[in-house]
Amino acid sequence: MTLFELLYFLGYSIKKGYVAMNQKRLPHQVISIGNITLGGTGKTPATIALAGEAKQRGFRPCILTRGYKGKAKGPCFVSRGEGPLLSADEAGDEAVLMAEKLRDIPVVKGKNRYEAGMFSLSSLPSALQPDMFLLDDGFQHWALFRNKDIVLIDSSVPFGNRKMLPLGTLREPVKEIRRADIIVITKTPSHPSPSRGEGKGGGDSHHPKIESLIKEIKTYNPDVPIFLAEHSPEAFITAKGKTFSLEQAKGKMVFAFCGIGNPHSFRETLLSAGLQIKGFLAYRDHHRYSAGDMQSIKDNAERTESEWIVTTEKDIMRLRSFSMPENLVSLAIEFTVDGRFYDEVFS
């Protein structure tokens, strides 16, 4: 551990100890979806899928989110279940995307998630009164008690360079996955997930890299259920809502850009969908686009004679204040996982 990592870890440990001493509980079950690295594990599609499944199983979930980089002071509604009430500038792109995708499921923004949860209980009508809270990006939110902690690990870059902030992407030491109640290895090829028993040492054979990752996870958390999940391309959608199937998109010459945690993963997904990438721009995660950025993207698309300009759903949320070209589309992503995962979560 370097000096910079040590200083970060000391600050992290002091904060964790102080906040955990004053931890509060909401009056209903709290399920957290988080990770131990900065961005890129696919939390937003996973949270959307989990919320939808909770609704299907008869629960009334409410999503509690920090609303990263959103300027609105919480607690406040990003959605009451009828679509976004705030812009990405006010609520953060991830929160607005969840509000866009999930109807009849409220999304509440607040730095203090306990206050956000209590705000939802005091403000929502009886038909939308939550009986379960989904805590977006909550693995390090010590201030709130969670009944279950789901941790997502990106199979392509599980722990980054294995260094903690500020030299790497780890928010805390890898060994802290021992606190997880359920682990999901994301962005894996399509195949069966390890069951609870297989997570202990047997079962189907997987890619050697996945096998090695499962083995390492078990050294820290030997009894944790482990599931494999895909983040699969679903369709391409224009700013006006027109949808193009994957078959219609195949072979298109595109200029792509994004401002997400793992731009390489986005690029690979486009290639797997059969698109021809003529140019690619990667911005910082949660980049706030300017008019100059938008013009540069258009110019690059024209220069490369691209038919489409392609970005992510989260990036589109940050572009709505601009006049967007008609050939700009976003890639909708579907989170797919073995159904036993949901049985484990809601058991």
Image: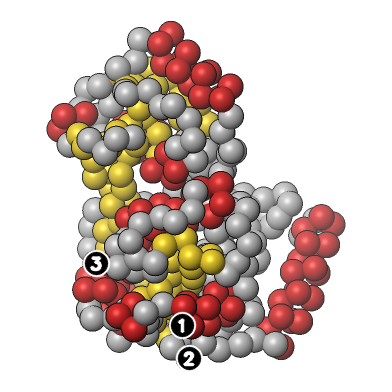
Eye-nearest disc, 2 or 1: 1
**Residue 209 appears anywhere in the view:** no
Mark 1 or mark 3, earlier in chain: 1
- Classify 10 Å Cα crowding around label 1: few (below 14), some (14-19), many (20 and above): some
Of residues 85 and 338, the one nearer the viewer is 85
How far is mark 1 from mark 3, CA to CA? 32 Å
Tell me the kind of residue under disc 2: Pro
How far is mark 2 from mark 1, CA to CA? 10 Å
| Secondary structure at numbered mark 3 | loop
Give the quarter of the figure containing the C terminus. bottom left
| Secondary structure at numbered mark 1 | helix
Label annotation for residue 301: none
For disc 2, the marked residue is: 27
For disc 1, the marked residue is: 121
| Secondary structure at numbered mark 2 | loop
- Percent across and percent down for residue 272 are 28, 35
Tell me the kind of residue under disc 1: Leu
**Residue 57 appears anywhere in the view:** yes
Pointers 3 and 2 in contact (CB under 8 A)?
Answer: no
Pointers 2 and 1 in contact (CB under 8 A)?
Answer: yes
- Classify 10 Å Cα crowding around label 2: few (below 14), some (14-19), many (20 and above): few
- Percent across and percent down for residue 224 are 42, 79
Tell me the kind of residue under disc 3: Asp
Give the quarter of the figure containing the N terminus. bottom right
Eye-nearest disc, 3 or 2: 2
Q: Is residue 52 above or below residue 42?
A: below
